[in-house]
């Protein structure tokens, strides 16, 4: 007899281990069945990156390739993100990347064998939120960057519009600042090469604001050279700023220093 799993959504909270560490939480997430998406995805795709990353990038959910690899941002969108980070002067190896939802939600259309991405609904995002909250609490990033509407609205509220407030430092109890920008997969979906080129440029511009914010915060809160990421980011962002005289966007807000006290 075939067991049918109904699309239900509870909360992953009961799966979070006591005295959590990143490794314990990652291991526990592998067995999560708090919503029905575990029946669709190949495996839980937990975040990855340094334990004390200064920046955490949050996307919507793993894609087809991430689902198979069990790692976030390793597909085409991840490669584009790598390139955009490099352009913006942010070292990819120093950032933590994760998703609002840890299982791949997909559907098939017609006779196609392709698994087509399907947007997670509010109940699924809510069910998965304890994993994301645990990652934020354990990594304690200085800056969070939300990629796309799903992650942005999960952290900044349903009214938030990426198109309106992208690339700005937004105050939040979760970090010194949250920046929102588009998801790299939206850049890949642009209708033609010109539109795609422009969308990629805008993504890099948003990430450059993140680099500048880190640069400004590093100057305020730590002796020069005290933190590897700050100095590296600082060097590269400064270099980029020098070559980008047209960059007249507003300076990031003065944010609180979470780790300097
Ligand atoms: Fe658990 Fe999140 Fe996967 Fe749902 S999507 S089963 S809440 S890990």
Image (tube, helix red, strand yellow):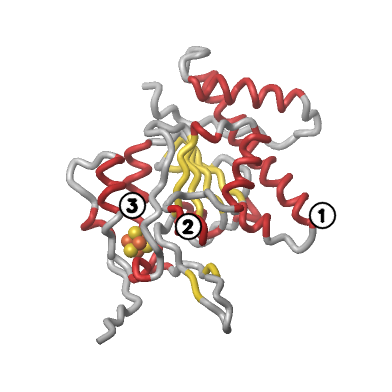
For ligand 1, give the image quadrant.
bottom left
Residue positioned 44% across, 33% down in the render: 53
Looking at the picture, tell me which residue is in the foreground, 110 or 13. Answer: 110
Classify 10 Å Cα crowding around label 1: few (below 14), some (14-19), many (20 and above).
few
Q: Of marks 2 and 1, which one's residue comes earlier in the chain?
A: 2
Q: Of marks 1 and 3, which one's residue comes earlier in the chain?
A: 3
Residue positioned 53% across, 61% down in the render: 159
Q: Nearer the viewer, mark 2 or mark 3?
A: 2
Q: Which mark is residue 194?
A: 1
Residue positioned 60% across, 41% down in the render: 82
Is 165 above or below relative to 246?
A: below
Looking at the picture, tell me which residue is in the foreground, 210 or 177. Answer: 210
Name the spot of residue 99 as percent of width and height, x first: 45, 53
Is 108 above or below relative to 159?
A: below
Q: Quadrant of residue 12?
A: bottom left
Is 40 above or below relative to 223?
A: below
Residue at which label 2 appears: 62
Q: CA distance from mark 1 to mark 3?
A: 38 Å
Q: Is residue 153 visible?
A: no
Q: Which mark is residue 131?
A: 3
């Amino acid at each position: 007899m075939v067991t049918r799993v109904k699309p239900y959504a509870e909360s992953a909270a009961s799966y979070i281990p006591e005295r959590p560490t990143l490794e314990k939480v990652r291991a526990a997430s592998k067995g999560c069945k708090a919503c029905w998406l575990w029946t669709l995805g190949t495996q839980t795709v937990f975040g990855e990156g340094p334990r004390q990353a200064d920046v955490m990038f949050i996307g919507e959910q793993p894609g087809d390739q991430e689902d198979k690899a069990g790692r976030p941002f390793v597909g085409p969108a991840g490669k584009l993100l790598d390139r955009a980070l490099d352009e913006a002067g942010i070292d990819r190896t120093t950032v933590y990347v994760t998703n609002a939802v840890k299982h791949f939600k997909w559907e098939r259309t017609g006779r196609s064998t392709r698994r087509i991405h399907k947007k997670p609904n509010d109940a699924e995002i809510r069910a998965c939120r304890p994993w994301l909250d645990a990652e934020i609490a354990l990594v304690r990033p200085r800056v969070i960057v939300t990629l796309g509407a799903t992650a942005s609205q999960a952290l900044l509220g349903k009214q938030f519009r990426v198109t309106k407030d992208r690339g700005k430092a937004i105050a939040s109890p979760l970090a010194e600042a949250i920046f929102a920008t588009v998801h790299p997969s939206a850049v890949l979906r642009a209708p033609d090469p010109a539109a795609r080129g422009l969308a990629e440029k805008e993504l890099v511009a948003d990430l450059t604001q993140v680099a500048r914010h880190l640069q400004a915060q590093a100057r305020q809160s730590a002796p020069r050279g005290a933190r590897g990421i700050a100095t590296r980011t600082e060097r590269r962002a400064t270099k980029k700023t020098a070559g980008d005289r047209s960059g007249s966007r507003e300076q990031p807000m003065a944010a609180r220093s979470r780790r300097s006290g």
